[in-house]
Structures are given as C-alpha cells and as structure tokens.
C-alpha cells in the first residue's frame, strides 16, 4: 500500500522560499537583451569611450543625454549617445565604428 503525504503550511513555505531563492540566484547581472538589439553600455563604458569623468557624464545626463534606468542602474545605447552628441555639435573622441567597446582594467584610473 502506498503512503500518502499531506503537506502542511511549513512545507509550502519552504518550497516557495526555495523556488524564489532559485529564481533570484539565476537573474543575470547584466541587463537582458535579445538577439539583434544594441547592447546597453554602463556609465564607465561611456565615460571611457569619450575620455570624460563620471562627473562630466552626469552633467551631460542633466543636460539631456539619453539614458535608460534599469534596476536602479543607468545604461546607455551607443547610437543614442552618438546621435545626441552629433546634434549638439560635439565630435566624439573615438570614432563611432572603432573600437566598439573599450575595456578598462579595474585598477586603471581614468584621468
């Protein structure tokens, strides 16, 4: 004869807690994007691309630089930033097609 298991409230709480914990651990740290979409760039990446400080970037944002906020963080679309600067008459320091991304080592300080 088979044993019948009847869960109690504690079992349900534990199962829900484990399921939520599993979901939260699998959330990617980078913003989600689908294939064919332009990747979102961080503040550090944009500041490095134009060789400006984060303070200057913040000032540009206050003046209308397009940005996107997700989960309390600020991201940029490269094409929107370039279009904004072109409209304002600024010439980017780095050509738009090369390099697409600049990676700065963690111990490197932007000047």
Image (cartoon, rainbow, N blue to C red):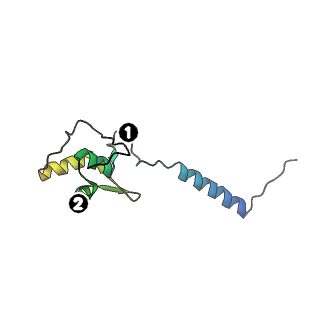
Q: Residue furthest bottom?
A: 9
Mark yes or no: residue 77 visible.
no
Q: Nearer the viewer, residue 28 or 12?
A: 28
- Depth order, front residue of 52/35: 52
Name the element at disc 2: helix
Q: What residue is disc 1 on?
A: 35
Which residue lies at the image location 63% right of the left edge and 54% below the top edge?
18
Residue 53 percent location from the top left of the image: 26, 53
Between 85 and 7, which is closer to the camera in this rendering? 85
Residue 87 place in picture, x, y as percent: 14, 51
Residue indicated by mark 2: 59
**Which quadrant would residue 21 be assigned to in this image?**
bottom right
Left or right side of 91 for 56: right
* Residue 33 image offset from top left, x and y in percent: 39, 45
The part of the image, by quadrant, that contains residue 15 is bottom right
Viewed as shown, does residue 87 lie left or right of 2?
A: left
Picture layout, residue 79 above or below residue 14:
above
Mark 1 to mark 2: distance in Å? Answer: 32 Å
Residue sitting farthest toward the left: 89
Residue at position x 54%, y 53% in the image? 24
Residue found at x 61% / y 53%: 19
């Amino acid at each position: 004869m088979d044993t019948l298991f009847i869960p109690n409230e504690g079992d349900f709480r534990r199962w829900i807690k484990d399921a939520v914990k599993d979901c939260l651990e699998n959330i990617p740290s980078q913003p989600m994007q689908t294939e064919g979409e332009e990747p979102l760039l961080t503040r550090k990446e944009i500041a490095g691309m134009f060789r400006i400080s984060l303070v200057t970037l913040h000032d540009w944002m206050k003046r209308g630089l397009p940005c996107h906020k997700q989960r309390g963080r600020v991201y940029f679309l490269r094409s929107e930033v370039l279009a904004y600067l072109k409209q304002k008459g600024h010439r980017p320091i780095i050509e738009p097609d090369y390099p697409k991304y600049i990676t700065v080592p963690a111990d490197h300080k932007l000047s």
